[in-house]
């Protein structure tokens, strides 16, 4: 008899399915935890995003989506 090897795979599954003949058991998040969890909102896309650091000059004020407001000090080499 083959050993079962469980795997956790992240993805979108609306509901689980069991294919017993193939030994495949797929469970959705709702099947395991009950009601659906709150989903994270996607981050807004910045309209003024830089394409490369060459657009910045030392001492330019910048806003980083994760780290907030700062001052550009140049590129570390």
Image (tube, grey):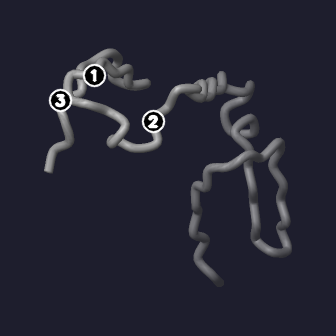
- Residue 65: give x, y in percent of width and height: 43, 24
The residues bearing labels 3 and 1 have C-alpha atoms spaced at a distance of 8 Å
Residue 24 showing in the rendered view: yes
Point out which mark residue 34 bears: none
Lower sequence index among marks 2 and 1: 2
Residue identified by numbered label 3: 73
The residues bearing labels 2 and 1 have C-alpha atoms spaced at a distance of 13 Å
Q: Residue furthest left?
A: 77
Q: Secondary structure at mark 3?
A: loop
Residue 43 showing in the rendered view: no
Lower sequence index among marks 3 and 1: 1
Q: Nearer the viewer, residue 14 or 40?
A: 40
Number of marks: 3
Residue drawn 62% across and 28% down? 42
- Residue 61: give x, y in percent of width and height: 30, 18
Q: Nearer the viewer, residue 68 or 52?
A: 52
Residue identified by numbered label 2: 50
Place residue 15 in its image quadrant: top right
Place residue 66 in its image quadrant: top left
Q: Is residue 74 above or below residue 25?
A: above
Q: Can you say which quadrant of the picture contains the N terminus?
A: bottom right
The residues bearing labels 3 and 2 have C-alpha atoms spaced at a distance of 16 Å
Residue identified by numbered label 1: 60
């Amino acid at each position: 008899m083959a050993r079962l090897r469980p795997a956790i795979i992240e993805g979108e599954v609306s509901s689980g399915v069991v294919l017993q003949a193939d030994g495949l058991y797929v469970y959705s998040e709702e099947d395991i935890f009950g009601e659906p969890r709150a989903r994270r909102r996607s981050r807004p896309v910045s309209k003024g995003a830089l394409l490369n650091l060459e657009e910045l000059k030392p001492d330019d004020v910048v806003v980083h989506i994760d780290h907030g407001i700062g001052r550009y000090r140049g590129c570390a080499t």
